[in-house]
Amino acid sequence: MEEAQQYFVYVGTYASSDQPGIYIYRLNEETGQLSFVDNLAGIDNPSYLAFDSQQRHIYAVSETLHYHEQQGGSVVAIARDQTTGTLQKLNQRPTLGEEPCYISVTPGDEMLLAVNYTGGSFCAYGLLQDGTIGEQIDFIQKTGKGLRTDRQEGPHPHSIVLDRSGKNVLIADLGLDKIFAYQLDLAAKKYVWQREIAVEPGTGPRHSVFSANGHYAYIINELTNSITVFAYDSATAQLHALQTISTLPIEYKDSAKNTSADIHLSPDGRFLYGSNRGHDSIAVYRIEQETGMLTFVQHVSTVGKTPRNFAITPGGRLMLVANQDTDSIVVFKRDADNGTLEPTGDRLEMPKPVCIKICAVR
């Protein structure tokens, strides 16, 4: 009998530095059961995490307004024991912008990229051979405002995502209703301007993901509860909108109380998933492979409130959903044939989970 795949699960939370901020669990993909391994304290609000290419290190934002008496948050390098899954903090660098909320690593581990949501800026660092973060090398400040005075009073970059080539990034700015495209100069550790793409005013683009073939980009819009499908040309970083589809059921009457949040592709590239905070659900779509267009499949309750983030196991059999406001992670079984989700009954209680990252046990 084949042994069930085992994974390490890392959960970033909102927590003060004197409390555990990153939690580590072991997941059995066959049973869906999560067992506690360890936790790491010493970081304020490690709300978003990213692995390096070999999963030897985890990088975290520290989503704060100040770091060491200077304005802005910080980014943190953490060593990961690939056998035990345990973590050890290495070093920390300021972002010089308030409340960093998303972090990415280039495929060759040359650069660390971060966006500052409240600061309206994004920055770049070189990564050293030992996994530590070097000095900040590039910093770009955006200005302006969007349509909505309550949420778009200034720039609010919310994600920075590498395309499949690893040469370009898309930065979704919720405050300006724009997608910024930059090429990466890996030698100089700099952003090179490509273009900006304006979306419908009041949309609030948040997170994005690329199709398996890299020809399409999917961006979830926080303020209009929708996903926009773009044709994408990696040679020019050009985006062309093809479709916008709601993340909510037609009959749902409280759309003003909902904000869409996270978006992920299934490992086989056939299905797309988006989370709703308010309706508290995951929306499931089938991807038409020839056109990149989406067809709605299912809404499923997250069995908790405010699903800010979720993750699919690399084997594609399970989804873990972080319900921020009910302090829980809920496990779902995923049907590989039709993409649908069903709760397994496994539920983990933990404080303020806001980011989940998964890697295989070696």
Image (cartoon, rainbow, N blue to C red):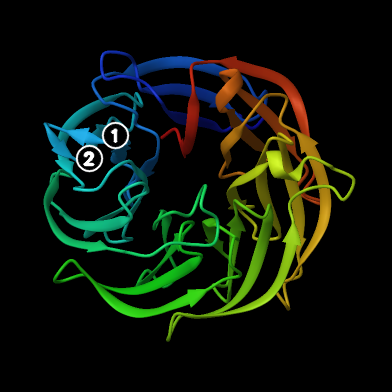
**Residue at left offset 57%, top offset 72%:** 213
Q: Residues within 10 Å of mark 1 (few under 14, many from 20)?
A: many
**Residue at left offset 35%, top offset 18%:** 39
Amino acid type for the residue under numbered disc 2: Ser
Amino acid type for the residue under numbered disc 1: Thr
**Residue at left offset 39%, top offset 34%:** 47
Is residue 182 found left or right of 265 in the rendered image?
Answer: left
Is residue 18 found left or right of 236 in the rendered image?
Answer: left
Q: Secondary structure at mark 1?
A: loop
Residue picked out by circle 1 = 64
Is residue 130 found left or right of 38 in the rendered image?
Answer: left
Residue picked out by circle 2 = 74
- Give the mark count: 2
Is residue 22 found left or right of 75 in the rendered image?
Answer: right
Is 200 situated above or below 92? Answer: below
Q: Position of residue 149 (x, y in %)?
A: 51, 52
